[in-house]
Structures are given as C-alpha cells and as structure tokens.
Image: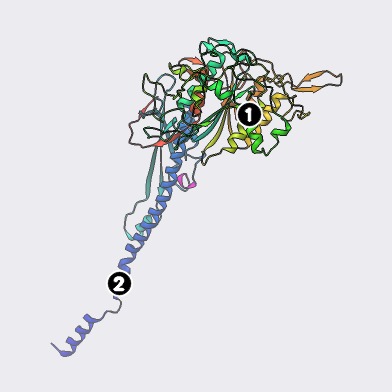
Amino acid sequence: MNCKHTFFLRRLINNQVGAVAVWMALLIPLTLGVAGLVVDIGYAYVCQRELQASTDAAALAAAAQLPTPAYAITAGTNFSAAPGKLNAYPNLSKPLAITNTTAVVTPGCVTITGLPQCGGDIAANAVQVNQSTTIPTFFIKAMTVFGIKGAQSINLSAQSTAVMRGAQRGPYNVAIVMDTTASMASNDSGNCNGTKIQCAEQGAQILLAEFSPCLPGLSSCGTSTNGNVNNAVDEVSLFTFPAQAPGTQLGNDEIYNTNTSTNCSGRNANPGCPDVVDYPDSIANTTLPLSKANMTTLLSQYQVVPLSSNYRTNDASYASGSYPLNPLTVANSGGTSSSPSIVNAVGGNSYFGGTRETGMLAEGGVNTFFAGAIFAAQQYLAANTRTNASNVIVLLSDGDANGGNMASSNLNSNGTYPSAIDQCQQAIDVANAAKAAGTNIYVVGYGVDSGGCSTDGTVGKNGKFQQNGLTACKTLQSIASDSSQFFVDTSSKVRCAGASNVTMDGKSNTLSAIFSAIAGDLTRPHLISNSIAFTAVK
C-alpha cells in the first residue's frame, strides 16, 4: 500500500474531533429523562402528601360525628380534597390535575380495647376515607419527542381510618359544680330511685369512671400525694353551692357517717352535717386579681375536694363484676381521710352496684346563687393550669337563682358580680369570662322549671319591679359553651329549646345518658392503622 494512503487512514482513525458532540447528542435524552424523573417524582410526592393530609383531616372530622353514620359521611366529605370542599388543594383538581379528587367516606366498626363497641345506639365506631386523583407528568411526557414513550400521568390514592370519640382524651382539669340546695333532697325515682342529690352524684361517678387518672398502659397509677398521682392525666375537683363553713365539707360531705347519712335536712340540722352559711361573695374578696388569701377564703367555702387523680387505681377498663372507682377507706365513721377522695364525696360506687358512701348532702338552708361557685371554680382552675391540660367546668343546677342570702353588705348595686340583683345574669357574665379564658363549660339542667330568675329585671317608672324575661332555661343555655353542651334531664318540667338530646339504653335525657355524653364529648377521635380489621356498615 502506498505510504501516503497508510498515513491518511491512520490519521483518520486517530482523529477525535466531534466525538464529544456525538456523545452529547446520545446523552441528551438520558439526561433530560433523569431530570424529568426527579422533577415529576418530586411533584407527585408533594401531591401525595396533600392528598394524604386531606384524607387524614376528613377521617378525623368524620369520626368526630360518630356514632351516626350519616353525620360522619357529611363531615368527612366536607373536609375532603374534592372540588369545593374545605381541603381542596389546587394541585388535586382540574385544571391542574387530569381528574378531580374523589372521596369515599365509609362508616364501619372496629374492635379496640377501650373503644365503645358497635351495637344498640352505636351504629358505627370508626370511619374509613379513601381518596384518589390523577395528576399529569411534565418532563417525562416531553421525552416522546425523542421517541421515548413516557408516562402521561400518575394515579394517586390515599386511605385513612379513624375511630370515634372514646378512643383518646385529655389531659383535663375538671371542676364539677354541684347544686346541694334543699330541692336536691327530694326523691327522683326516674333517674336513680333515690334523692336528686344521689342521682346527681351517680352522674359524677360516670364521669370519674370515664376519665383517665394516669397514663394508659400503667398497671397502677401508684400512690397519691394530696390526692394526685405522679402520672396524672385528668384531675377532677368538686365544688358545691350553697356555701359551707370552712372545714365541714371534707369531714362531713366526703366521709361516710352512719349517724348523718339520712338526716341532713335544713340548715345545720345535725352536728354531723355540713354547716351551711350565707353566700360569702363580696367585692372585698372577689376583685381580680384574687389575692392568695381571698382565693383561700372562696375555696374554703365552695370547694369540697381539690383537683384529684386518685379516683381510679389505673386507666384500664374495669372488668365485669368489679368496681371502677377507688373510694378511700377511713379508720372510723366521720373521720378525716389522709388523702382527699372525690369518690367518697360523690357517693362511692353506687352507680356501679358497689357500696354507697354518704357523699355530698343536700342540706339546703339558703336559696340558690351559683355565680359565686362558677367564679370560684374558674379562678381555681386558672391558678392550677397544667401544661397541655384544658380546663373544664361541669355545672348541674335547676337554673333558678332566686335570692341567695347574700350576707355581705359589700356588694355591687348594679347587678355586676357580686350583687344581690340580676343573679342569673351574673352567672352568665361569670361564665362568659371563664369561656373567654379558654374554659369549656358543660351545663346539666336538672329539674328545670319554666320560670326562674326572679331577681333579674328593672324597677319601672311606677316603682314596681319588672322581670326582664330571663328564665332558667335561657340562663343555663347561655352559661354553656354552646348548645351541644347544654342538657336538660327528663324530670324537668320544661324541655328547654336548644338543649341536646341524648339516649342510652333506650332512655332519652336521663342523667346517666347526659353524663355519659359529656364524658364521650371530652374524648377525641384519632387515626388508627389501616391494617386493623374494618367492617363497613350501611
């Protein structure tokens, strides 16, 4: 071969000019493909998180409306990511998405320890929400110009399961405010076949049986100091009106006393009974901010038991045949226990078939004035706030503030608390201040009449007093945080407009049903694993 030809071929073979351009041309589709894959996967991840978040929100909203399936479906749909709903993310609906998000809300039943089981009035105790949508791809789809068939869209789906109220609660600081005026000593065969105060105390026992004294999972809450355990979750205090002389509540209301268990009718009728006093509220001891001394004075006369968590030995559900509450044993009749016992103060375990302690007594002796008890309870809760704990007041009364035997002359004359006039309005004003401070108030109207509030009104030009139309019903409803937290029992002479209806064991608006509803309302729905067996209901 000619040397020239050989040299030319060798140069041609060794020449690298343009090789990079060739390789770049070959790598462009791959580079774009990788970049597109990263961008599209990132976008899909964001959309999936939005879809899952809205699914969780829908499930929790739906579970909060159980056990009524229809309500759950409505709430779940409203909080979904479907177009026009409360969690409708733009990325999950047209035109940004290829299809609109669809949401399917399915009520059903699950079996979990501590959760109210399906049956009777509980049609469903859980709900499952499924959502799906289709989103477009952007860069991957563009690869078709290079002849590479990429995905045109990505299908997304999410599922969440939540259980109804009754699954998780608190922590709470709770003040139960109980009416112990003379009317509470009358019999009530409809609610508990006992006196009205005994029926009311059984309602309080229901609350204590449902609250969590300590952290779940502990076999024992441990020993208590001054009524509280180390791992307290829900702490409960007890207040009463009318006011009682300092030192007589814990000794005579809380502890079983065989000599006085059936005979405490009338003011200071028996040496073993609480000493009822005229209402102590005055400008001098209720002006805010309360001094420590004034707080002590109010509590000494309105509070029966301070915040306590020794009402159950652990947080587990009680077994059949055993009693859920933990009454303290005292060495002798009428003695003072070493640790406060709210269980003894509300009659022990009588609702659950156990031994009944005397509990608080409806001695009466003065008329009804409950603004002071609400005021004292709120100030006490505010002064004993715990981290992450919510304050709650549960008031039981007939709603008729009618005189109150205001003993002090140091009162406001314009109906502003504390005052001898406008006593119903005072209770509303004090409750509104508590609600503004974040306290949640439940009201149980017990034996409510159509009238009431005889001290509320104005003196007309003719010199005669004219009531302003405020009634017991209106007062109690205004005290409650909202209408859903206002209840009127079946023994009341009037069914207050706007009161919530509750049913248990086929009976409507009994005290047991009302207090069970309150206990349930103070629990929260929560999400559970989708792997737990779920049975849909129609």
Q: Quadrant of residue 379?
A: top right
The percent coordinates of residue 200 (x first, y second) are: 54, 18
Return the mark for residue 22.
Answer: 2
Above or below, comparing residue 34 to residue 244 in the picture: below
Q: CA distance from mark 1 to mark 2?
A: 86 Å
Q: Quadrant of residue 155?
A: top left
Residue 378 falls left or right of residue 58: right
- The residue depicted at 47 percent of the width and 14 percent of the height is 506
- Residues rendered magenta in the picture: 90-95
Q: Which structural element holds mark 2?
A: helix
Residue 280 in the magenta stretch? The answer is no
Residue 144 falls left or right of residue 12: right
The percent coordinates of residue 64 (x first, y second) are: 48, 31
Going by the numbered disc 2, the residue's amino acid type is: Val
Q: Residues within 10 Å of mark 1 (few under 14, many from 20)?
A: many
Residue 91 in the magenta stretch? The answer is yes
Residue at the spot of label 1: 374
Residue 454 falls left or right of residue 51: right
Count of residue discs: 2
Q: Which structural element holds mark 1?
A: helix
Going by the numbered disc 1, the residue's amino acid type is: Ile
Q: What's the image's color scheme?
A: rainbow
Farthest bottom residue?
Answer: 3
Q: Quadrant of the C terminus?
A: top left
Q: Nearer the viewer, residue 492 or 129?
A: 492
- The residue depicted at 19 percent of the width and 84 percent of the height is 10
